[in-house]
Amino acid sequence: MSKAFAVFLQELREGRTHAEMTSALAELLQKVRDTGKGGTITLEIAVGPASRGSDVDKVVIKDKIKTKLPTPERGTDFYWLTDDSELTRNHPRQSALDLRDASTLTSTPPLKEAIQ
């Protein structure tokens, strides 16, 4: 009977592959929760003979972990273009209003009550 894959994965590179996969899965799960989008983890295992010849009694195993994490949506921003093709936040053909902070006014007019 063949060794269980889970056991092989825990032994591969003295457990480092298993630890990296566990860490990658935790990161992927958090990113899926944060973005609401999916992602992937791919484990590639390459097996080759350890030496040349027809009698293969040893193999070399390499692993590669690829993670594709979801990315959040990037927002957009709005700018106006001036006549010189420069970016500005303010409409270039609209005059600015002289606004003041109403909370800094020292005198307030008395309130009037409505008669019913």
Image: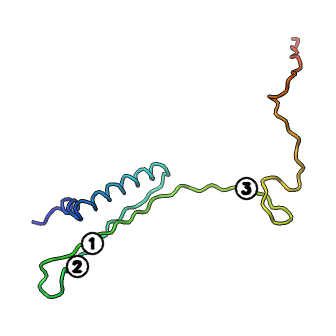
SS for dot 2: strand
Disc 2 + disc 3, Cβ < 8 Å: no
Location of the C terminus (image quadrant):
top right
SS for dot 1: strand
* Front residue of 27 and 106: 106
The residue positioned 37% from the left and 52% from the top of the image is 26
The residue positioned 32% from the left and 59% from the top of the image is 20
Few, some or many residues within 10 Å of mark 1 (<14, 14–19, 20+) = few
Q: Which residue is mark 3?
A: 78
Disc 1 + disc 2, Cβ < 8 Å: yes
Q: Which residue is mark 1?
A: 62
SS for dot 3: loop
Horizontal relation, residue 43 to residue 57: left or right: right
* Amino acid type of the residue that numbered disc 2 sits on in the rendered structure: Gly
Give the distance between the C-alpha atoms of the residues marked 2 and 3, in whole angstroms. Answer: 56 Å
Few, some or many residues within 10 Å of mark 2 (<14, 14–19, 20+) = few
Q: Which residue is mark 2?
A: 48
Few, some or many residues within 10 Å of mark 3 (<14, 14–19, 20+) = few
Mark found first going from the N terminus, 2 or 3: 2
Residue lying at the far top in this picture: please name it. 116
* Amino acid type of the residue that numbered disc 3 sits on in the rendered structure: Phe
Indicate the position of residue 95 as horizontal and vertical percent values.
90, 49
* Amino acid type of the residue that numbered disc 1 sits on in the rendered structure: Lys
Indicate the position of residue 51 as horizontal and vertical percent values.
18, 83
Q: Which mark is residue 17?
A: none
Q: Nearer the viewer, mark 3 or mark 1?
A: 1
Relative to 20, residue 44 above or below: below
Location of the N terminus (image quadrant):
bottom left
